[in-house]
């Protein structure tokens, strides 16, 4: 498994960013979730002028490779390019910047070892215009004798071999990525992914332009109805908000073994499915906490995700489980299988 994160920014607000993401730096309040400015009229992350607003996605698992792959759709907020070099994304080892990709006032991309004032590794031709979405990808091996390649809309615009290790001390020389940190620019960002190149295809190289689709439970009950709704008998209606409403409507249980499953709307997009992630907005008020895992009901069989997670906090936060393949078949998901499935949770301990 080498897919570490993917993000649509569609199912939460600015106020809830810290519950979904690993960290948020809203320096000068310049980091937002912006409704309607994503690539498909959905939401986008906005890093705005005059601050160093950036985010770190929450990774699904530990990193297992010196390779880092990052992809994200980017559009300038205004009809002009930044006035000076403006950070788009960074690869870090702890707090050490390993690589930083910036956009210039002429529409070129620059890659630096370290921060945007570090060692320049290369500059692309002018490839970025204002007010247009581009899908930008960086694939790099972090090493003293490393390599890098930057693609825009699938085309190689900058590549080479170089020292890409700016002093990283961890085993794999990187631990996280950041999106944003614009300083002199303002950008909408959408449909992000992070991989580490470990394992097998398709997650060991460039994923290419992709769309991350967010689906929210529909009203009605699924097959499993062990959890109790806060009002009425419609469990789907308790969790069908576009963004969570905390304790206004919810489903709950304190009983080990209880399951709840939900029907989702159709994916609405044709094509190859890379993976499915279940994100549940949870808190626990039971003394000692509870452990839960994701479930997927497919073709009359309920599958449990093999990695339960402890819910020990009384504050709501997102918990995410990744299914890289369809558990019923062991191969890539099909859109039809997702449309026919139910997804939910089980209390395991």
Image: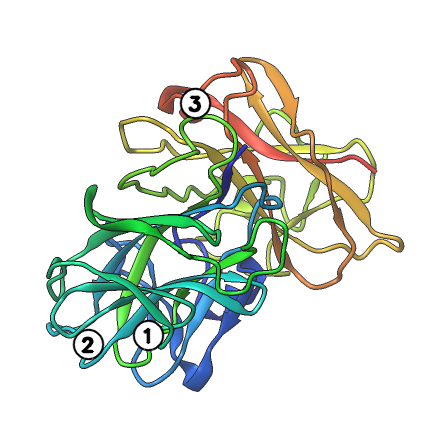
Q: Is residue 129 left or right of residue 63?
A: left
Quarter of the rendering occupied by the C terminus: top right
Height in image: 246 above or below 292? below
Judge whether 185 appears above or below 213 on screen. Answer: below
- CA neighbours of label 1 inside 10 A, class few (<14), some (14 to 19), many (20+): many
Query: Which residue is drawn at the image coordinates 48% and 54% (left, top)?
Result: 144
Q: Secondary structure at mark 1?
A: loop
- Which is more foreground, mark 2 or mark 3? 2
Pointer 3 local density, CA inside 10 Å: few below 14, some 14–19, many at least 20: many
Marker disc for residue 182: 1
Question: Front-most of 163 and 283?
Answer: 163
The mark that comes first in sequence, 2 or 3, is 2
The mark found on residue 82 in the picture is 2
For the N terminus, give its image quadrant: top right
Query: Looking at the image, which residue is at 36% across and 31% down?
Result: 266
Q: Position of residue 192 (x, y in %)?
A: 37, 50
Verify CB contact (< 8 Å) between mark 1 and mark 3: no
SS type, badge 2: loop
Secondary structure of the residue carrying numbered label 3: loop
Mark 2 burial class by Cα count in 10 Å: few <14, some 14-19, many 20+: many
Residue at the far right: name it.
Answer: 287
**Total label count?**
3
Q: Is residue 136 left or right of residue 327?
A: left
Q: CA distance from mark 1 to mark 2?
A: 9 Å
How far across and how far down the image is residue 292, in percent?
73, 40
Q: Position of residue 204 (x, y in %)?
A: 43, 34
Residue 149 versus residue 33 in the image, above or below: above
What residue sits 46% from the left and 38% below the top?
197
In the rendered view, tell whether residue 303 sits above or below residue 318: above
- CB under 8 Å between discs 1 and 2: yes
Q: Which mark is residue 333?
A: 3
**Residue drawn at point x = 42 percent, y = 41 percent:** 215
């Amino acid at each position: 498994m080498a897919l570490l994160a993917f993000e649509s920014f569609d199912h939460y607000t600015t106020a809830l960013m810290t519950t979904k993401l690993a960290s948020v730096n809203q320096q000068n309040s310049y980091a937002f979730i912006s409704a309607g400015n994503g690539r498909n009229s959905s939401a986008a992350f906005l890093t705005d002028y005059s601050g160093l607003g950036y985010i770190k996605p929450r990774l699904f698992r530990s990193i297992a490779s010196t390779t880092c792959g990052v992809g994200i759709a980017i559009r300038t907020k205004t009809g002009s390019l930044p006035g000076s070099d403006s950070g788009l994304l960074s690869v870090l080892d702890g707090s050490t910047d390993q690589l930083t990709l910036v956009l210039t006032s002429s529409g070129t991309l620059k890659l630096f070892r370290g921060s945007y004032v570090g060692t320049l590794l290369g500059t692309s031709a002018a490839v970025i215009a204002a007010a247009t979405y581009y899908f930008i990808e960086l694939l790099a091996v972090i090493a003293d004798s490393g390599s890098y390649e930057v693609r825009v809309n699938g085309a190689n615009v900058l590549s080479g071999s170089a020292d890409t290790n700016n002093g990283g001390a961890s085993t794999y020389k990187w631990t996280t990525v950041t999106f944003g940190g614009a300083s002199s620019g303002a950008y909408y960002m959408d449909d992000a992914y992070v991989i580490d190149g470990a394992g097998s295809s398709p997650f060991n190289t460039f994923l290419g332009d992709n769309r991350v689709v967010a689906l929210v439970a529909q009203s009605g009950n699924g097959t499993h109805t062990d959890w109790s709704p806060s009002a009425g008998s419609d469990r789907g209606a308790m969790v069908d908000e576009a963004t969570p409403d905390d304790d206004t409507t919810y489903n709950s249980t304190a009983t080990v073994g209880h399951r709840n499953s939900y029907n989702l709307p159709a994916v609405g997009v044709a094509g190859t499915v890379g993976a499915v992630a279940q994100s549940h907005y949870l808190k626990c008020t039971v003394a000692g906490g509870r452990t839960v895992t994701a479930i997927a009901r497919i073709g009359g069989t309920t599958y449990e995700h093999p990695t339960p997670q402890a819910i020990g906090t009384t504050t709501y936060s997102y918990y995410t489980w990744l299914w890289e393949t369809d558990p019923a078949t062991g191969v890539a998901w099909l859109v039809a299988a997702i449309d026919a499935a139910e997804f939910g949770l089980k209390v395991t301990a």
